[in-house]
Amino acid sequence: MIIALKQDAGRDEVRNFASALEKQGVKIHFSEGASQTVLGLVGDTTLIDEESLLAHHLVEKVIRVQEPYKRANRKFHPADTRIDVPGADGVVRHIGSGYLGIIAGPCSVESREQIVEVAGAVKAAGAGLLRGGAFKPRTSPYSFQGMGCDGLNLLLEAKKETGLPIVTELMAIHQLEVFDEVDIIQVGARNMQNFTLLKELGRCRKPILLKRGLASTITELLMAAEYLMAGGNDQIILCERGIRTFDSHTRNTLDLSAIPALKRQTHLPVIVDPSHATGIAWMVPAMSKAAIAAGADGIIVEVHNNPEAALCDGEQSITPEEFGGLMGILRKYAELEGKKI
């Protein structure tokens, strides 16, 4: 249930009103806009009388939410959420609510030289955050699985060298103890419905980049976000990374329609991964432009200084030079959309 309060509602009155509602067994989620406060009631609202609420002098309107996701619902939180990520250089990067977050870097960390070189290049081109896999989930047990903690340490070195905040994937709960200095924790497509992991990350106070599952619906993605938010973590970034279809021309099928659909349903920022969606490097620029044009709040793209020699996903990685050219175009797209990079 959502209760929109009148514009002249005083803070003390609102607190007293919310306290009275909580005594009826519900939890209150506050959303304070520029001109109106919205109360989101989470829990069993069947016993709360709608007519009595409408008769209250503070209440403007009451809406019952039909969707199973509550905290992630735009009705609960009409204004777009913005994720703020401070870097080691003292600069705060923003994703959502008028800002495009550009996350770039290699699929996996392979050496100090590689990750530091790529980090410097993507920062110079205009990326705000550095991605890199230390722990890699692979379909084949014989494929390169990442450098593990050594790779994470190299990623932290690149962070120190460039100041860029880092984004890397967490595969299991026990790895959390070594993720203290990671700025954004990525939950991969294979773990989107690992509810035990999501509950644990819900207690974490770091931004979470949540990727859509290989064959998951938009509602299932939002319910996964709800697991995180139910634990108290509201710093969620949703990522469309392509879904599995019958077509084998590309690695996955990039569902661009998911972007406006999600933006209508949720206040959370939505970004796109054109690298995993297509699996083909020459398609990445076109799909990046399409994503921004469709309303995405950013992209996460794979950049490698020598794709032909990459230990992981070289065929979908663009070079630093190609990334620099792409950034020049995306700045123009950002201007057209009225957003900042």
Image (tube, helix red, strand yellow):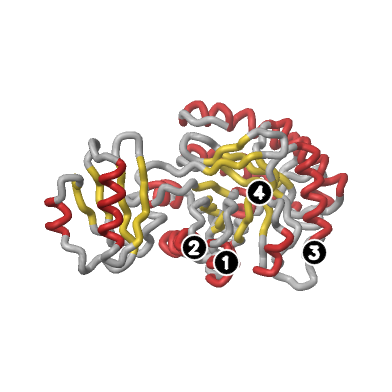
Q: Quadrant of the N terminus?
A: bottom left
**Residue 150 in view (yes/no):** yes
Query: N-terminal of the two: label 4 or label 2?
Result: 4
**Residue 246 in view (yes/no):** no
Query: Mark 1 and mark 3 in contact (Cβ < 8 Å)?
Result: no
Query: N-terminal of the two: label 1 or label 2?
Result: 1
Q: Is residue 2 above or below residue 37?
A: below
Where residue 231 is drawn, which disc sits there? 2
Q: Is residue 127 above or below residue 183?
A: above
Disc 2 residue type (three-letter): Gly
Disc 4 residue type (three-letter): Asp
In front: mark 4 or mark 3? Answer: 4
The residue singled out by tag 3 in the image is 144
Disc 3 residue type (three-letter): Phe
Q: Nearer the viewer, residue 138 or 93?
A: 93
Question: Could you say whether the residue bearing mark 4 is in a helix, strand or loop?
Answer: loop
Query: Mark 3 and mark 4 in contact (Cβ < 8 Å)?
Result: no
